[in-house]
Protein backbone atom coordinates (compact mmCIF):
# COMPACT_ATOMS: atom_id res chain seq x y z
CA UNK A 1 0.00 0.00 0.00
CA UNK A 2 1.25 3.48 -0.87
CA UNK A 3 2.74 5.87 1.65
CA UNK A 4 0.41 8.83 2.14
CA UNK A 5 2.78 10.85 4.29
CA UNK A 6 1.92 14.52 3.93
CA UNK A 7 -1.11 13.89 1.72
CA UNK A 8 -4.35 15.68 2.64
CA UNK A 9 -7.40 13.42 2.56
CA UNK A 10 -10.97 14.66 3.02
CA UNK A 11 -13.60 12.08 4.01
CA UNK A 12 -17.25 12.92 4.55
CA UNK A 13 -19.22 10.83 7.03
CA UNK A 14 -16.08 9.78 8.89
CA UNK A 15 -17.53 9.15 12.35
CA UNK A 16 -19.03 5.71 11.63
CA UNK A 17 -18.57 2.52 9.64
CA UNK A 18 -16.54 2.62 6.43
CA UNK A 19 -15.82 6.33 6.81
CA UNK A 20 -14.34 5.89 10.28
CA UNK A 21 -12.26 2.94 9.11
CA UNK A 22 -10.94 5.04 6.21
CA UNK A 23 -10.03 7.87 8.58
CA UNK A 24 -8.06 5.58 10.86
CA UNK A 25 -6.28 3.74 8.05
CA UNK A 26 -5.23 6.92 6.27
CA UNK A 27 -3.89 8.34 9.55
CA UNK A 28 -1.87 5.14 10.01
CA UNK A 29 -0.48 5.60 6.49
CA UNK A 30 0.77 9.07 7.38
CA UNK A 31 -1.93 11.26 5.82
CA UNK A 32 -3.49 14.40 7.21
CA UNK A 33 -7.22 13.65 7.38
CA UNK A 34 -10.16 16.03 7.51
CA UNK A 35 -13.57 14.55 8.16
CA UNK A 36 -17.07 15.66 8.94
CA UNK A 37 -20.36 14.30 10.23
CA UNK A 38 -23.63 15.38 11.76
CA UNK A 39 -23.11 13.84 15.22
CA UNK A 40 -20.70 15.89 17.33
CA UNK A 41 -20.47 13.24 20.05
CA UNK A 42 -19.22 10.69 17.54
CA UNK A 43 -16.76 13.18 16.07
CA UNK A 44 -15.44 13.92 19.57
CA UNK A 45 -15.06 10.18 20.19
CA UNK A 46 -13.17 9.80 16.90
CA UNK A 47 -10.83 12.64 17.90
CA UNK A 48 -10.24 11.14 21.35
CA UNK A 49 -9.37 7.79 19.76
CA UNK A 50 -6.88 9.46 17.40
CA UNK A 51 -4.98 12.07 19.39
CA UNK A 52 -3.02 13.69 16.59
CA UNK A 53 -2.67 17.06 14.88
CA UNK A 54 -3.14 15.19 11.60
CA UNK A 55 -6.89 14.82 12.21
CA UNK A 56 -9.37 17.66 11.70
CA UNK A 57 -13.04 16.96 12.45
CA UNK A 58 -15.94 19.35 11.91
CA UNK A 59 -19.69 19.05 12.43
CA UNK A 60 -21.31 19.32 9.01
CA UNK A 61 -24.60 18.30 7.44
CA UNK A 62 -23.74 17.62 3.79
CA UNK A 63 -27.30 18.53 2.80
CA UNK A 64 -26.49 22.12 3.72
CA UNK A 65 -24.35 23.57 0.94
CA UNK A 66 -23.15 26.50 3.06
CA UNK A 67 -21.86 24.09 5.72
CA UNK A 68 -20.07 22.01 3.10
CA UNK A 69 -18.46 25.11 1.59
CA UNK A 70 -17.33 26.22 5.07
CA UNK A 71 -15.84 22.78 5.75
CA UNK A 72 -13.80 22.70 2.55
CA UNK A 73 -12.66 26.29 3.15
CA UNK A 74 -11.58 25.33 6.69
CA UNK A 75 -9.54 22.41 5.33
CA UNK A 76 -7.83 24.64 2.75
CA UNK A 77 -7.19 27.35 5.35
CA UNK A 78 -5.61 24.75 7.65
CA UNK A 79 -3.55 22.66 5.20
CA UNK A 80 -3.66 24.51 1.88
CA UNK A 81 -4.52 21.58 -0.40
CA UNK A 82 -6.71 18.52 -0.96
CA UNK A 83 -5.12 15.45 -2.54
CA UNK A 84 -7.98 12.99 -2.12
CA UNK A 85 -11.69 13.58 -1.61
CA UNK A 86 -13.80 10.60 -0.52
CA UNK A 87 -17.55 11.23 -0.62
CA UNK A 88 -18.63 8.66 1.95
CA UNK A 89 -21.54 10.34 3.77
CA UNK A 90 -24.75 8.47 3.05
CA UNK A 91 -27.98 7.06 4.36
CA UNK A 92 -30.18 4.13 3.40
CA UNK A 93 -33.91 3.40 3.65
CA UNK A 94 -36.25 0.44 3.95
CA UNK A 95 -39.84 0.78 2.78
CA UNK A 96 -42.01 -0.27 -0.13
CA UNK A 97 -42.71 2.28 -2.87
CA UNK A 98 -46.44 1.95 -2.15
CA UNK A 99 -45.88 2.98 1.48
CA UNK A 100 -42.86 5.28 1.54
CA UNK A 101 -43.24 9.01 2.09
CA UNK A 102 -41.85 11.53 -0.38
CA UNK A 103 -39.92 12.99 2.58
CA UNK A 104 -37.96 9.75 2.97
CA UNK A 105 -37.07 9.67 -0.72
CA UNK A 106 -36.02 13.34 -0.72
CA UNK A 107 -33.88 12.93 2.40
CA UNK A 108 -32.01 9.96 0.91
CA UNK A 109 -31.43 11.76 -2.39
CA UNK A 110 -30.33 14.96 -0.64
CA UNK A 111 -27.67 13.20 1.43
CA UNK A 112 -26.42 10.58 -1.01
CA UNK A 113 -26.49 12.57 -4.24
CA UNK A 114 -26.60 16.28 -3.48
CA UNK A 115 -24.19 15.90 -0.56
CA UNK A 116 -21.66 14.46 -2.98
CA UNK A 117 -22.35 17.17 -5.55
CA UNK A 118 -21.91 19.98 -3.00
CA UNK A 119 -18.69 18.53 -1.59
CA UNK A 120 -17.15 17.69 -4.94
CA UNK A 121 -17.98 21.10 -6.44
CA UNK A 122 -16.45 22.86 -3.43
CA UNK A 123 -13.27 20.76 -3.44
CA UNK A 124 -12.82 20.32 -7.21
CA UNK A 125 -10.50 23.29 -7.90
CA UNK A 126 -8.15 22.22 -5.10
CA UNK A 127 -8.12 18.56 -6.19
CA UNK A 128 -7.50 19.55 -9.82
CA UNK A 129 -4.58 21.74 -8.79
CA UNK A 130 -2.66 18.67 -7.55
CA UNK A 131 -4.07 16.12 -10.04
CA UNK A 132 -5.70 14.37 -7.11
CA UNK A 133 -8.41 11.76 -6.69
CA UNK A 134 -12.18 12.08 -6.20
CA UNK A 135 -14.00 9.02 -4.87
CA UNK A 136 -17.70 8.33 -4.48
CA UNK A 137 -18.74 5.55 -2.12
CA UNK A 138 -21.67 4.10 -4.02
CA UNK A 139 -23.38 0.72 -3.72
CA UNK A 140 -24.44 -2.40 -5.56
CA UNK A 141 -27.79 -0.57 -5.53
CA UNK A 142 -26.22 1.79 -8.06
CA UNK A 143 -26.14 -1.10 -10.54
CA UNK A 144 -29.22 -3.05 -9.47
CA UNK A 145 -32.42 -1.54 -8.07
CA UNK A 146 -33.13 -3.18 -4.72
CA UNK A 147 -36.68 -3.73 -3.43
CA UNK A 148 -37.49 -1.77 -0.31
CA UNK A 149 -34.66 0.60 -1.16
CA UNK A 150 -36.02 2.49 -4.15
CA UNK A 151 -34.80 5.91 -3.02
CA UNK A 152 -31.41 4.52 -2.05
CA UNK A 153 -31.07 2.80 -5.42
CA UNK A 154 -32.10 5.98 -7.26
CA UNK A 155 -29.54 8.05 -5.34
CA UNK A 156 -26.73 5.61 -6.10
CA UNK A 157 -27.64 5.34 -9.80
CA UNK A 158 -27.55 9.14 -9.91
CA UNK A 159 -24.23 9.20 -8.08
CA UNK A 160 -22.63 6.71 -10.48
CA UNK A 161 -23.86 8.61 -13.53
CA UNK A 162 -22.74 11.99 -12.22
CA UNK A 163 -19.27 10.73 -11.33
CA UNK A 164 -18.94 8.98 -14.69
CA UNK A 165 -19.80 12.25 -16.44
CA UNK A 166 -17.26 14.11 -14.31
CA UNK A 167 -14.63 11.45 -14.96
CA UNK A 168 -15.15 11.83 -18.70
CA UNK A 169 -14.98 15.63 -18.51
CA UNK A 170 -11.62 15.31 -16.72
CA UNK A 171 -10.28 12.59 -19.04
CA UNK A 172 -6.57 13.08 -19.65
CA UNK A 173 -6.33 15.95 -17.18
CA UNK A 174 -4.48 14.00 -14.49
CA UNK A 175 -7.33 14.30 -11.98
CA UNK A 176 -8.82 10.88 -11.28
CA UNK A 177 -12.48 10.10 -10.56
CA UNK A 178 -13.70 6.70 -9.33
CA UNK A 179 -16.63 5.10 -7.51
CA UNK A 180 -16.64 2.11 -5.19
CA UNK A 181 -19.50 -0.26 -4.44
CA UNK A 182 -18.89 -2.06 -1.14
CA UNK A 183 -21.80 -4.51 -1.13
CA UNK A 184 -23.16 -5.49 2.30
CA UNK A 185 -20.67 -4.23 4.90
CA UNK A 186 -20.87 -4.05 8.69
CA UNK A 187 -21.77 -0.50 9.64
CA UNK A 188 -24.48 1.57 11.27
CA UNK A 189 -26.12 2.35 7.92
CA UNK A 190 -28.95 -0.18 8.29
CA UNK A 191 -29.77 0.94 11.84
CA UNK A 192 -29.81 4.57 10.70
CA UNK A 193 -31.75 3.71 7.53
CA UNK A 194 -35.00 5.65 7.18
CA UNK A 195 -38.39 3.97 7.38
CA UNK A 196 -41.44 4.97 5.36
CA UNK A 197 -41.97 8.01 7.62
CA UNK A 198 -38.37 9.29 7.39
CA UNK A 199 -37.48 8.02 10.87
CA UNK A 200 -34.45 5.87 11.70
CA UNK A 201 -35.16 2.13 11.64
CA UNK A 202 -33.10 1.58 14.78
CA UNK A 203 -32.40 -2.05 13.90
CA UNK A 204 -30.98 -4.15 11.09
CA UNK A 205 -32.89 -6.99 9.40
CA UNK A 206 -29.61 -8.33 7.99
CA UNK A 207 -27.05 -10.72 9.50
CA UNK A 208 -24.25 -8.26 10.17
CA UNK A 209 -21.89 -11.04 11.27
CA UNK A 210 -21.85 -12.52 7.77
CA UNK A 211 -20.76 -9.27 6.12
CA UNK A 212 -17.39 -7.78 5.18
CA UNK A 213 -15.99 -5.63 7.98
CA UNK A 214 -15.69 -1.87 7.56
CA UNK A 215 -11.93 -2.19 8.09
CA UNK A 216 -11.54 -4.72 5.26
CA UNK A 217 -13.71 -2.59 3.01
CA UNK A 218 -11.60 0.50 3.75
CA UNK A 219 -8.45 -1.45 2.93
CA UNK A 220 -9.88 -2.42 -0.49
CA UNK A 221 -10.87 1.18 -1.19
CA UNK A 222 -7.40 2.51 -0.39
CA UNK A 223 -5.81 -0.14 -2.61
CA UNK A 224 -8.16 0.91 -5.43
CA UNK A 225 -7.12 4.54 -4.90
CA UNK A 226 -3.45 3.46 -5.03
CA UNK A 227 -4.07 1.85 -8.43
CA UNK A 228 -6.42 4.62 -9.63
CA UNK A 229 -9.06 2.11 -10.62
CA UNK A 230 -12.10 3.27 -12.56
CA UNK A 231 -14.52 1.51 -10.22
CA UNK A 232 -14.55 -1.15 -7.53
CA UNK A 233 -17.24 -3.73 -6.78
CA UNK A 234 -16.70 -5.71 -3.58
CA UNK A 235 -17.81 -9.12 -2.25
CA UNK A 236 -18.71 -12.21 -4.23
CA UNK A 237 -22.41 -11.46 -3.86
CA UNK A 238 -21.91 -7.91 -5.11
CA UNK A 239 -19.92 -8.97 -8.16
CA UNK A 240 -22.41 -11.74 -8.94
CA UNK A 241 -25.31 -9.30 -8.66
CA UNK A 242 -23.73 -6.82 -11.09
CA UNK A 243 -22.87 -9.62 -13.53
CA UNK A 244 -26.34 -11.20 -13.38
CA UNK A 245 -28.11 -7.89 -13.77
CA UNK A 246 -26.04 -7.03 -16.85
CA UNK A 247 -26.32 -10.32 -18.69
CA UNK A 248 -29.40 -12.05 -17.20
CA UNK A 249 -31.66 -9.21 -15.95
CA UNK A 250 -34.89 -11.24 -15.79
CA UNK A 251 -33.17 -13.90 -13.71
CA UNK A 252 -31.70 -11.17 -11.51
CA UNK A 253 -35.22 -9.85 -10.88
CA UNK A 254 -36.30 -13.26 -9.62
CA UNK A 255 -33.23 -13.77 -7.44
CA UNK A 256 -33.51 -10.30 -5.90
CA UNK A 257 -37.20 -10.83 -5.15
CA UNK A 258 -36.60 -14.12 -3.37
CA UNK A 259 -33.68 -12.65 -1.42
CA UNK A 260 -35.64 -9.70 -0.05
CA UNK A 261 -39.15 -11.17 0.20
CA UNK A 262 -40.67 -14.12 2.03
CA UNK A 263 -44.30 -15.08 1.45
CA UNK A 264 -44.77 -11.79 -0.37
CA UNK A 265 -43.52 -9.74 2.59
CA UNK A 266 -40.37 -7.62 2.65
CA UNK A 267 -38.06 -9.24 5.21
CA UNK A 268 -34.64 -7.71 4.41
Image (tube, rainbow, N blue to C red):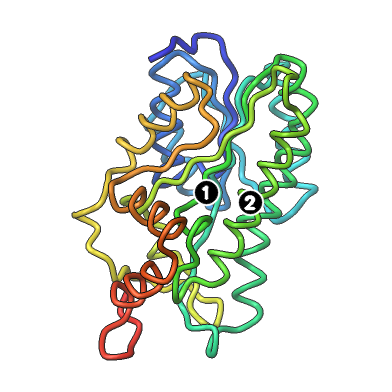
Horizontal relation, residue 166 to residue 23: left or right: right
201 vs 207, left or right, is: right
Residue 164 tag number: none
Tell me the CA gap for discs 2 and 1.
7 Å
Return the residue nearer the eye: 178 or 65: 178
Please state the horizontal and vertical placement of residue 263, each as a whole percent of the image.
Answer: 26, 90
Q: Quadrant of residue 245?
A: bottom left
Rendered residue at 51%/76% (across/down): 199
Residue, disc 2: 159
Q: Where is residue 260 in the image (x, y as percent from the top left)?
A: 33, 75
| 177 shown above or below 180 | above
Q: Which residue lies furthest to the front in this view?
A: 247
Q: What element carries label 1?
A: loop
Q: Residue at x 31, y 51 (%)?
A: 186
What residue is drawn where x is 59% and y is 41%?
87
Label 2 crowd (10 A; few <14 / some 14-19 / many >=20)? many
Dot 2 and dot 1 residues touching (CB under 8 Å): yes
Instruction: Say whether residue 182 is left or right of residue 134.
Output: left
Disc marking residue 138: 1
Direction left: furthest residue: 209
Amino acid sequence: MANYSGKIVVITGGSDGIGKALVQQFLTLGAKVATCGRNMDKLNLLSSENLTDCLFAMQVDVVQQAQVDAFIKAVLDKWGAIDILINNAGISMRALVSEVSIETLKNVMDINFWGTVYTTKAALPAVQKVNGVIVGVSSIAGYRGLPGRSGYSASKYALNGWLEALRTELFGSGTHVMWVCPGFTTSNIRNAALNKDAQAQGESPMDEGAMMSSEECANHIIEAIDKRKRSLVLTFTGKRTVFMNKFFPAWADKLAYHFFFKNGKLVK
